[in-house]
Image (cartoon, rainbow, N blue to C red):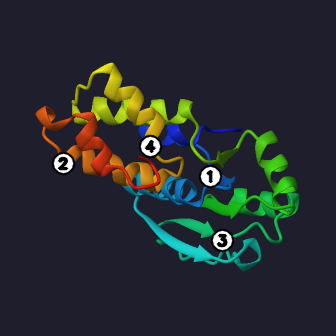
Amino acid sequence: MRLDPINLLFNNELELDKNLYFIGGNEITLMEKVSSRIVEKYKTNDDISLTRIDSIDNFNNDKGLFENKRVYLGKNCKGFNEANLNKIKESGDIFIFIQENSSKTKRVKNIFSKDKNCYLIDCYELDNSSKIKILNEFLKLCKIKIDKKIYWFLIEKLENKYIFLENTLNKILELEQKDLKINNLKQILTAEDA
C-alpha cells in the first residue's frame, strides 16, 4: 500500500498498523524525516529497541523470551524477495527499509505496493501542493496567521528539499507575529530562495 509522506509527518491520528515500510525516492532529507517519524511513533506506543542492518540478508530473528519488540532500520533492499518478505512478516518486528531510487528498487517497490501488509512511501522533492500542506500544518500547529500575499510568497520561495523548508519555517517561528512581513521573510530565506 502507498502512503503519502506528508500525511505521515503531520497526521497524528494516522495509525501505523503495518510492520513493513519501504521508503524510497530521491529526496533523502524527507526520507530520513519519514523514517524517524515512524520510529518515533512506535517508540511512543511500544517499548521497542532499534537495530540497524545493512540489508535483509543481515536479519537474524534470534531474540530472547522477554526481549522487546524491535524496529529494524535497513539501509538498502539488497537480498529482498518474496521468501524474505514472508520470513520477516512472521517475526512480528517492524522493518523500515530506506533506499534512494535505482534500478534495484523497482522490483521491491512493486512488491510493497501490492502487499496489504506493507507501506510504500515515495519521497520526492516538494512540489507546490506538498509545500501548501506543510505550510498549512505549520501555521495551524503554531497558531500563526499571515495574509494571503505572504502565504503565496512563502509557497513560491520555500525550498523543495524538506530539511531546508523545515529550517526556514523554524526561523519564521522565531519572529513575532508583527514582524511577519515580506522584507523580513526575504532576509530569512537563503540566497537561493530570495
Which residue, given by chain and number where applicable, does mark 2 sit on?
A: 174
Which residue, given by chain and number where applicable, does mark 4 sit on?
A: 158
Mark toward the viewer: 3 or 1: 3
Q: Which sits earlier in the primary sequence, circle 2 or circle 1? A: 1
In this rendered view, identify the residue nearer to me: 137 or 15: 137
Give the side of residue 1 with respect to residue 17, left or right: right
Give the side of residue 99 with respect to residue 11, left or right: right
Image quadrant of residue 2?
top right
Kindly identify the residue that appears in the image at 81 percent across and 40 percent down.
114
Looking at this rendering, what residue extends furthest in the top direction?
148
- CA gap, disc 1 and disc 4: 34 Å
Image quadrant of residue 141?
top left
Mark yes or no: residue 11 visible.
no
Q: Position of residue 98 (x, y in %)?
A: 65, 62
Name the quarter where the N terminus is drawn: top right
Q: Position of residue 13 (x, y in %)?
A: 42, 33
In this rendered view, identify the residue nearer to me: 153 or 22: 153
Which residue, given by chain and number where applicable, does mark 1 sit on?
A: 19
Kindly identify the residue that appears in the image at 73 percent across and 39 percent down.
116
Dot 2 amino acid type: Glu
Q: Which sits earlier in the primary sequence, circle 3 or circle 2? A: 3
Dot 1 amino acid type: Asn
Q: Tell me if mark 3 has few (under 14), some (14-19) or many (20+) residues whose alpha carbon lies within 10 angstroms of its own.
A: some
Which residue, given by chain and number where applicable, does mark 3 sit on?
A: 75
Q: Tell me if mark 2 has few (under 14), some (14-19) or many (20+) residues whose alpha carbon lies within 10 angstroms of its own.
A: few
In this rendered view, identify the residue nearer to me: 83 or 173: 173
Dot 4 amino acid type: Leu
Q: Which sits earlier in the primary sequence, circle 1 or circle 4? A: 1
